Amino acid sequence: MSEQSEVTSDQWPGSLDAMVAAPAHHEVLLENQHVRVLDTKLGPGESTPVHTHPWPSVLYVLSWSAFVRYDREGNVLVDSRDWSSAPEKGTTLWAAPLGPHSAKNVGTGELRVIAVELKTERMG
């Protein structure tokens, strides 16, 4: 069971948080005052609504598929098909907070990533 808390980012409205704006593609596995762990899934041809990820995160790749990330106006931010190589299953990546964006799986497999979002707070 997870303990959910309200998103507290001054950067973007809570209505754009991934769990509010795109819950069909994000499942909370654990949430407390320190972290939120999301299971993110995007099937072939699927797109997410515009949403945000307000905290930096560690990403763990369960399965990979090519994707395109767009800003809220539909401009391409990232096209993974342009990368020199695709992350393999088991790859761990770092991600900064993500502002308003949508994503489309343009590959043939499921894109599935566990995101451990590190909630920022004052230490000490």
Image (spheres, helix red, strand yellow):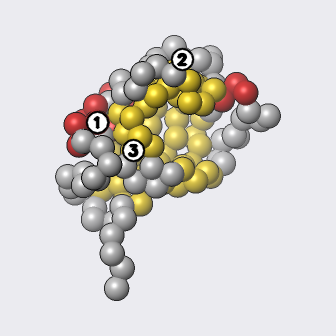
- State the separation of the CA atoms marked 3 and 1: 9 Å
Q: Which residue is mark 3?
A: 53
Q: Residue furthest top?
A: 45
Q: Which residue type does callout 3 highlight?
A: His
What secondary structure is found at the residue carrying circle 3?
strand
Name the quadrant containing residue 17.
top left
User: Is residue 97 something that shows in the picture?
Assistant: yes
Q: Which residue type does callout 1 highlight?
A: Leu
- State the separation of the CA atoms marked 2 and 1: 23 Å
> x, y percentage for residue 30?
33, 54
Mark 2 crowd level (few <14, some 14–19, many ≥20, 10 Å Cα): some
Q: Which residue is mark 1?
A: 16
Q: Marks 2 and 1: CB-CB under 8 Å?
A: no
Label 2 vs label 1, nearer the camera: 1
Q: Residue at x 45, y 43 (%)?
A: 98
Front one among 73 and 32? 73
Q: Marks 3 and 1: CB-CB under 8 Å?
A: no
